[in-house]
Every structure is written in structure tokens, then in C-alpha cells.
Amino acid sequence: MTVEIYRDAWGVPHLRAGDARELAHAQGLATAHDRAWQLEVERHRARGTSAAFLGPDALGWDRFARQARLDDTARRCFTALERRDPETAAWVRAHVDGVNQGLPEGARRAPEFTAVGLAPGRWEPWTPLGVWLATHVLFAGFPGKLWREEVVRHLGPDAVGLFATDGPGTSGSNGWLVTGERTATGGPVVAGDPHRYIEAPGVYQQIRLSCPEFDVIGLAVPGVPGIAHFGHTGTVAWAITNAMADYQDLYRERLRRTGDGGRVGDGVGAGGRVEALGPDGAWHPASRHTEIIEVADGDAVEVEVIETDRGPVVINGDTDPYGDSESDPYGDGGDDTDGGSGRDRGGDASTAPLSLRHPPRVTEDLGFSALLPLLRARRVADVDRAFDDWAEPVNVVQAADTEGGLLHRVAGRVPVRSEDNRTRIVNAWEPGHEWRGWYAPMPRGTVDDGIAVMANQRGPAAPLGVEFAPPHRATRLRALLGTRRDWSAADMAALHMDSHLASAAPLLDHLAALDGLTPEAATLRDRLLHWNRHMTADSTEAATYAAVRGAVVRRLAAHPALARLTEPRLYPEVFRPWLALVPRVAFALESLLRAEELYGIDRAEVVRAAVEEVAGDPPKGTWGDTHRLAPWRALPDPSYDEYDEGDEDDEREPGLSGDHDCVLCTSAVPGLTDRAARGPAARYVWDVARRENSLWVVPFGASGVPDSPHHRNQLPLWVRGDLVPVVTDWTKLMKDSTWRTER
């Protein structure tokens, strides 16, 4: 096999091979050379073995991965793929072979392996599917149903809507399409930026895949063959955003051990067989086994893995949330026997085990059959057909081709079931909560006046979801795009960087209505009322607004009416981002400030106290002084950790413009931190008419190797909003290496 690897000035790999399977091998090989540490972290996360070298901080995820049976689901999906689509299965195997060939060399270049004493392992054919599943299993936000249970428990069902907004645990994106009637070339432009937790190395890899059958540029997920989310084949380009659909259910289970096993919740060593009460009133066998999680610098942990007819039990319900041995953990007045040979738990959501039902576990399909057809696509119709096989996660897709074809649709698997399943935790033993097939046909959007915008708002996916992002980003993008009919690819960078914060309006309205302020507070208020509402890094007004907003959030969260939500039931650590009160208040602040009544809270006085607080100790710098990038690293770098946000001289990561509801979505968590852990994980502009005019950028660089010149060379451009040209002329690329290997 002959593979040619070229690189552009930014280190982006351009791969050329004799056929699609050789190319998949080359992609795995090149990725292993550039991203060996990242690949191995993702492999271990998919298997639930990352604590073995990352330590106790990774234990929460590993426990979830084991109990959710992520690796087993990936294995099942690959076995089914071999049966249903042997060509794609062989293509995935070739990719895995390339990863395994490249990992030893890649690991030698990556100092992290030495730092933790880790040797590169061996990828299995299903590992790419496991990486994909582990990356996306939380995208639909099923832990939000835990939060709704808490809100109903403390405040009642009417309060759920007050907090219904794009929360801290949700990933989103901007995406837009303009047709030829609005561009300088007369051809469409597709552009946008996926919003995720910013990781180092980045979650997207710029790459080019070329063989006699196709030649595609795009953003790949390291460890997964092909280009799934954002690609350009030369004649058609596509992009996705999170549809915000709800397609995962949580079931409250009644479980019992039979024989001498005791009750579920007695601990993993209790043993015995487990049965689950079904909607037919009968007890059905559940699978049960234990697994050992090794923990670096800690004791190994035994985990019980249970799966009912609904799905894996992801919350065992074995913690007494009240800290009171006399409390009733069964929700049945103290009678914890079932009249038979075992003991059961059920009733209250705080103590009942919870099982997760999600499409890949049910269908044994992760949608990998869409990947090769996407690479082979020549027209919008090809992309459309490919996305008919899409499964996980559910996305909104936009595409355009050189012949004028346009696409705006939802793709993925959404089960048909009761409304209760979609909004809350349901009882497994009650009839009416089963899945009844799949939502079809998937909804389609429109392109109006030459524009289509997707930004996680209520759009074509509205029938499939429960909570969506506020409309601000979508509204702003449509307004900006509507001002011109001569857009070029290069012009789109300005839209990526738009920092207008429409969600500031409710708080500023409250400020405007205040009277009787101290002179210092009145001056501060007047400054904010004349502010242009742009969250730019060099703005002192943006910093002041953020300080007032944070003070309002903290005061609302501390109010007795809401403070009951500060101590949710003791769910596993991995779900805590969805259950923390301060972030929930922060991201629902518009709704909370505009509600007709808020449980007796005097919001005018809350705002007054906040502005007086900030006037007494105003920010000393600009928004960018504290709104700094805070990327996630599997292996923390001490030089970047836990620095003082108030230290204006600290420049270990750059200051950023933008905010959660800006088009430039760099998310802080008001009330907790100004640092941005989430933001654009890439930016792209696909010029459909002239692919060579396309542009892209990632937060760090093409390489995950710290001493590579391409490790962080795109970061300054990403911060400024500049984009890197996509190089399509092979003569302008630099030859890297040629491998001749036997597969």
C-alpha cells in the first residue's frame, strides 16, 4: 500500500491513497502520529478505564461508562455493522489498523505517556464506535430530567419552564447557509462554528482525504474514520448543529435480588440475581455483573452493572440522600418486602435505580453507514440520502451544491413515545412508557430569502425537543446576513466574531427602573445603560455588566425561595453539571427576571443590591482580563490551573470576547466564573462555488504534540477571529512522508 501524506503551512494533513480503504488506514496512521495521547485518552474513556492513569478525578466518568455499557454497546453496534454493511465495517477496520500501526511512534513523541506511565494499548474494530458514543452520549442532555424532578419537587411543575433554556451541560453550534443570490460568486456559502467544551488537543481535526473515488476536506473527530460533521467534496458541502432533540429516556426501576442476594442498593458485593418489575406486573430477569475500576494513586473500585429490559441502570439508587438512617428509602411507608423471596426498591426518584434507554443500545446502530456515502457525495441529494442513515446524535443539517441544490433537515433517530417520557423520569412498572417506533419522516426546514440559520433555536427540530437555546444567536445571524447580497467567504469571519449580547436586555431594563441609588451606583447604572451591549475583550463596560450579572445570579440563587435547589439528591458526579443551581439560574436569568412573579422574590431589590455591591468594588480591568480561555486537558498542566481571575498580568491563556448568548459563544458561568470552558471548537466557511476560497480555524493547532510547531499555532488567529485558508492545490503542499505497508 502506498500512502502519500502532505501538509500545508499550518500542519494540516492532506492524505492521498489508492482507494477508500487504504485512505482510512492512512487517516488512522496520521492521526495516531499527531494525536496519540488524545486517541488513547478517548479509547480509555469509551471503555471506562481512564482512572487507571488519570487518577480519582476520572473515576466518576469511568463509573458511568461502565454502568451505561458504552464499550459493550459499541461492540454490539460494530457486530451489527459487519452484518448490515460489510463494506463500511471493513473500512472502519482499516482505520483501526492504521491507528494501531501509528500509535507506538505517536506515543514516543507524546510526553504525556511517560508522565503517567502509560503504554499505548491496542484498538479494537469497535473502538471508533466507542469513541463516537462516549463523545455524544450526553448530547441529548438526559440528565436534565433529573433537574426537572428537583424543580418539581421543590417548586412545583409550573417552575420547570422558568429554567427551560440552553443549560451548562449542553453542546450547541451556529450554522448558516446563504444562497447564490446573496453572494459575490453567485454560489452558496455554508459557514458556522460548533460549540463544545474546548479541549487541548482540539475535538476537531482539520484534514483532507483524497483517493480516486473522492477528494474531501473537512473537520474529523480524531479516532473516527471519515468526515462526519463538516465537509466539502468540491461540488457539495455540508454542516450540522445540535438539533436539541430529546431521544433518551430515564426509567425509575423497581429491582429486587432473589435468593440470598439481599436488596438492590446493599452494595456490589451483595451478589444474587436481579429482577425488575415490568409494566405487565411481572418480575423479569435483569442482567447483572460486577466490574473493577483501577484507579491510579487510589484503591480499585468495584462497580455493579445492571441492565433491565429498558436499558442499563446508570444510577443505582444506593445512597441515602437524606443522611438519615430512619428515612424511608423505598417510598412505601417502610414495607420493603415484595411478598416473595427478594426485596425491592422503587418509589421516590432519589432512591430508586434509574435506567437509561437510548437508540444505539436499542437498535445496535450508531449511524456509521452514513460516513462513506458522505465522502462520496457529489450533490445535495447524495448528502440527503446519506443522512437518512444518521443515528447519533440528532442534528440539523445544511448543505448546498454547485448546481443550486439546497438542504435543511433534521437527521437522526428519535423514538415515538409518551410526552411524559420526553419531559421527566417515568416509572418502568407503569404501562404506557414503551417506545413505539421512530419519528418519521424527519422534519425539514426552509431557506427563506436566500438565508437559512441554525443555532439550536426552535426551528425544524421543534417537534422533537423539549428545551432549546434562546433565539438570540439565530435572530442576530439572520439580521446580519440580511444586510447584504454580496457576501464572500472571507466576509464570514466578522459574523463568527459578533459579540452583541441581546440577552442583557432584561437586566438592563431592571437597572433603568431603579431609583434612589447611591451616587456611585447611579453612575455605574448610567454607564451600563449607554453601553453598546457588545461583550468585547477590551470593554470595561462589558466587565462591569458581567460583574453585576454575576452578583444578581448569586443573590437569586441564595434566596430562600430558590436555595432549596442548592442541595439536589445525591446523584453520581458525572450528572452534577446539570444539577448545580447557580449555573441554572445564570443561564435562565432572562426568564427569571421577566417572569410575572417569582415566588415572592423582590427582583428590583436583588438588582439594586447587586449594583450597589459592584459599585462599591468595581472591576479593575476589561472583560478580557477575566474572561479567559479555560480548556480541558486530560492531564492537567499545573502552569494553567487555578489562577486568580483578578490577576490582570496572568496571560497563560488568552482573554476572549463573546459570551454565552452571543454569536461568538464563549461561555462563562455567571455567578461562578468568567473563564470560558466552552466555545467554538472550530470555525469553517465552505465556499461551494470555489472550494479553494474556503477557510477554517481550530482553537489550538493540527498537532497534539507539545513540541510541534503546529501545536498551538492557530490559537492567536482563533482568538482574533482570523481564518486559515483551505489549500486544495497539491503543488502548494509540503510532502511529509510516504509509507509502504502491508495491511
Image: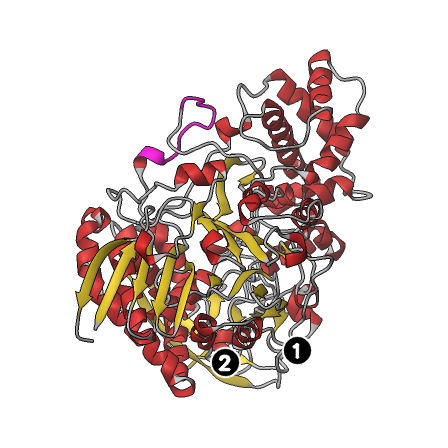
What amino acid is at disc 1? Pro
> Which residue is depicted at the point 51% across and 80% down?
309
User: Which image quadrant for residue 328?
Assistant: bottom right
* Distance between the alpha carbons at the discs numbered 1 and 2: 18 Å
Residue 443: percent from the left, percent from the top?
67, 71
Tag of residue 363: 2
The residue tagged 1 is: 441
> Which residue is depicted at the point 51% across and 33% down?
627
Position of the N terminus, as image quadrant, is bottom left
| Res. 682 in view | no
Q: Outermost residue toward the top?
A: 519
| Res. 143 in view | yes
| Residues rendered magenta in the picture | 639-649
Looking at the image, which is closer to me, 257 or 700? 700
Looking at the image, which is closer to me, 209 or 306? 209
Residue 558: percent from the left, percent from the top?
64, 36
Left or right side of 58 for 234: right
Left or right side of 232 for 451: right
Relative to 10, is 16 above or below? below
Tag of residue 619: none
Q: Residues within 10 Å of mark 2 (few under 14, many from 20)?
A: some
Looking at the image, which is closer to me, 89 or 285? 89
Residue 482: percent from the left, percent from the top?
71, 48
User: Which image quadrant for residue 512?
Assistant: top right
Dominant secondary structure of the magenta stretch? Answer: loop
Residue 512 in magenta?
no
What amino acid is at disc 2? Thr
Relative to 593, is 742 above or below? below
Sooner in the amino-acid sequence: mark 1 or mark 2: 2
Residue 226: percent from the left, percent from the top?
39, 67
